[in-house]
Image: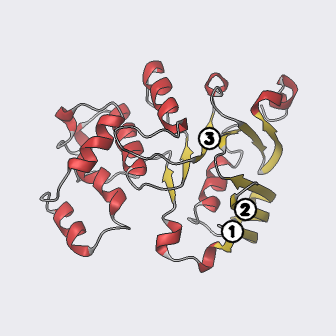
């Protein structure tokens, strides 16, 4: 039986007289590993922002767990985590503090205050930083003192620590070398427990590189705000890709 977690029906998003998404229908089912393909400006980031509730559609409906997204509480919305293309890290905080920020929806004010003062426990954050191939030498360093690739991995660790059911990622492999890209892609796509850590079971990742499609079971192609194909990865053809590139 198919268990639909996220659903868009007739979703259009217009901004400054530009239509970024145009009558999009989409179902994301439990266990899906989806690669979202398209040129820059095709609508990938807008689609992810609609899916996680950051922006509201101009028209159409968004449902999470078969409920209207606007009627969900914070705990229900926290079932989705996002790795943003622009990372959205806090420059004045350390790597470990930034990762702990992923827990703020689940923790109380005292936890947030201790994290801000750098006296919180960072044991859990260190597990996720290590999982993302980061050395302990950078854990306490401010974000503005580490490299772009390290920042990228801190953002991934911050998202994973949330323990969400659904992970949305917008070009999460920028600034990473080929080996790290391969390792982290495998990490995000796995459903196994690593170091007693449960990873999201349902994934949507926007990509530019076609050589990264191994491991996905579904491929969506978007162009000019419209989904032009939504296919089983094994049925994807060159002619499909020519529609969006």
Q: Residues within 10 Å of mark 1 (few under 14, many from 20)?
A: many
Nearest-to-viewer mark from 3 and 2: 2
Nearest-to-viewer mark from 1 and 3: 1
Instruction: Name the quadrant containing residue 3.
Output: bottom right
Q: Which residue is mark 2?
A: 7
Give the residue at x 19% y 69%: 113
Labels 2 & 1 near each other (Cβ < 8 A):
yes
Rendered location of residue 26, percent (x, y):
77, 55
State how far apart marks 3 and 2 are (Cα).
17 Å
Q: Residues within 10 Å of mark 3 (few under 14, many from 20)?
A: many
Q: How many marks?
A: 3
Rendered location of residue 115, percent (x, y):
20, 61
Give the residue at x 48% y 64%: 78
State how far apart marks 1 and 3 are (Cα).
20 Å
Q: Which residue is mark 3?
A: 206
Give whichever of 175, 35 is nearer the camera.
35
Q: Which residue is mark 1?
A: 63
Q: Give SS at disc 2.
A: strand
């Amino acid at each position: 039986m198919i268990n639909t977690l996220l659903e868009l029906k007739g979703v259009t998003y217009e901004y400054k007289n530009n239509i970024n998404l145009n009558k999009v229908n989409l179902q994301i089912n439990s266990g899906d590993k989806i690669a979202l393909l398209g040129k820059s400006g095709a609508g990938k980031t807008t689609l992810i922002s609609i899916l996680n509730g950051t922006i509201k559609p101009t028209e159409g409906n968004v449902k999470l767990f078969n409920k209207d997204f606007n009627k969900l509480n914070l705990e229900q919305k926290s079932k989705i985590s996002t790795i943003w293309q622009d990372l959205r890290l806090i420059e004045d905080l350390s790597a470990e503090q930034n990762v702990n920020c992923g827990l703020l929806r689940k923790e109380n004010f005292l936890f947030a205050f201790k994290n801000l003062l750098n006296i919180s426990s960072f044991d859990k954050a260190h597990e996720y930083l290590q999982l993302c191939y980061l050395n302990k030498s950078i854990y306490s360093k401010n974000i503005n003192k580490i490299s772009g690739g390290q920042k990228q991995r801190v953002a991934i660790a911050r998202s994973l620590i949330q323990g969400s059911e659904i992970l949305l990622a917008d070009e999460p492999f920028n600034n990473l070398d080929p080996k790290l890209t391969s390792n982290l892609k495998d990490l995000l796509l796995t459903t196994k427990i690593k170091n007693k850590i449960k990873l999201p079971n349902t994934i949507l990742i926007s990509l530019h590189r076609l050589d990264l499609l191994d491991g996905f079971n579904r491929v969506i192609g978007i162009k000019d705000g419209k989904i032009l194909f939504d296919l089983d990865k094994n049925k994807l053809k060159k002619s499909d890709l020519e529609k969006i590139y």
